[in-house]
Image: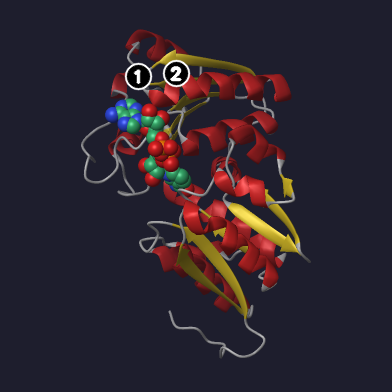
Amino acid sequence: MGRELAITGHTELIGLVATPIRHSMSPQMHNAAFDALGLDYVYLVFEVGKEELKDTVAGLKAMKVRGWNVSMPNKGDIVQYLDHVSLVSELCGAINTVVNDNGVLTGTSTDGTGFVRALSENGLDIKGKKLVLLGAGGAAAAIMAQCAIDGAKEIVVFNKKDSFYAKAQERLKLIEEKTGVEMHLYDIDDKALLKQEIDSADVLANATSVGMVPHQDSCLVEESDLHEGLYVFDCVYNPKDTLLLQRAKKVGAIPVSGVYMLLYQGAESFKLWTGKEMPIEVARKAIG
Ligand code: NAD
């Protein structure tokens, strides 16, 4: 879709600072949404790594840019250049959105909000619910932090005994201390325990990269681990119909695609910058 508004002296910039980042679908999503609402902004990506981050933030601030997204490798490092950080970012240790209010920079993470909204749009309020989460990386940290803030009853995390596992122990402790939500961390190779925890869960979410192209034939749970009425969320959005979601459908579970987490995290950032609701169907069409 082409831009309807002419670029003029009034056009404002919103950016995304990360590397590698040329593959991102955020420009298509945000530019289509700006266009649909007649908002005079353009969204561009900038290949910025750790070395250039400090100067980039200073430059964006000096140019009075309204806000920007942040992705790897800058999600943690950017904290030191901001004035305020939201509770969810404090708990998950990452920033994906910065808002510039007249020179005061506030960072937050909208990935977890995207997850919670994708569930609620499918009929589930996370408050008082039990979540089993596969993975303890960046996406998982944002999800566990937001779900704890939003009043989940219990969050059970399963991960491989890799470098993420040790770091996750500290993160779970911090989230439990700050929110009072019951948190557990277990080895994902304990398949009997995994099945037992899923049996009493309301939501199962995959926040690992397992199932992503080119490994779309892999899945961390069997059909027999799932049950009717369970919400099964896959953060993986490439492919859209992952093996996990296919297994969920077969047993009468409720599949929720990571495409919606992607859209709703974008919608939350969009609202923080513009004060407007992102037109979701327009954004969805724009990302294909
Ligand atoms: P990350 O590198 O921070 O974490 C990767 C996680 O996967 C770790 O917990 C790691 O232990 C686990 N893992 C990797 N290989 C595994 C295996 N073979 N078996 C079991 N666990 C394994 O990555 P991330 O940024 O958290 O992203 C994870 C996935 O979530 C990716 O597929 C990414 O595309 C997706 N994601 C989706 C959205 C969205 O909006 N839908 C947002 C962020 C990330």
- Assess disc 1: are there few (<14), some (14-19) or many (≥20) residues with their C-alpha within 10 Å of its C-alpha: some
Instruction: Tell me the quarter of the image containing the N terminus.
Output: bottom left
Whether the residues at callouts 1 and 2 have beta carbons within 8 Å, the answer is: yes
Give x and y (percent) for residue 148.
Answer: 65, 28
Q: Up-down: is 94 above or below 282? A: above
Identify the image quadrant of residue 189: top left
Give x and y (percent) for residue 7.
Answer: 56, 88
Identify the image quadrant of residue 9: bottom right
Q: Distance between the residues labelled 1 and 2?
A: 7 Å
Along the horizontal axis of the image, is 225 left or right of 266? Answer: left
Name the residue at 63% across, 36% down. Answer: 146
Q: Up-down: is 11 above or below 284? A: below
Residue wearing tag 2: 198
Give x and y (percent) for residue 173.
Answer: 62, 18
| Amino acid type of the residue that numbered disc 2 sits on in the rendered structure | Ile
Of 190 and 58, which appears nearest the observer? 58
Name the residue at 51% across, 73% down. Answer: 32
Identify the image quadrant of residue 144: top right
Total marks drawn?
A: 2
Instruction: Tell me the quarter of the image containing the C terminus.
Output: bottom left
Give x and y (percent) for residue 237.
Answer: 37, 48
Name the residue at 57% across, 25% down. Answer: 171
Disc 2 C-beta below 8 A from ligand 1: no
| Amino acid type of the residue that numbered disc 1 sits on in the rendered structure | Asp
Query: Quick one: label 1 or label 2, which is nearer the N terminus?
Result: 2
Of 225 and 206, which appears nearest the observer? 206
Helix, strand, or loop for circle 1? helix
Q: Which mark is residue 225?
A: 1
Coloring scheme used: secondary structure
Helix, strand, or loop for circle 2? helix
Along the horizontal axis of the image, is 108 left or right of 265? Answer: right
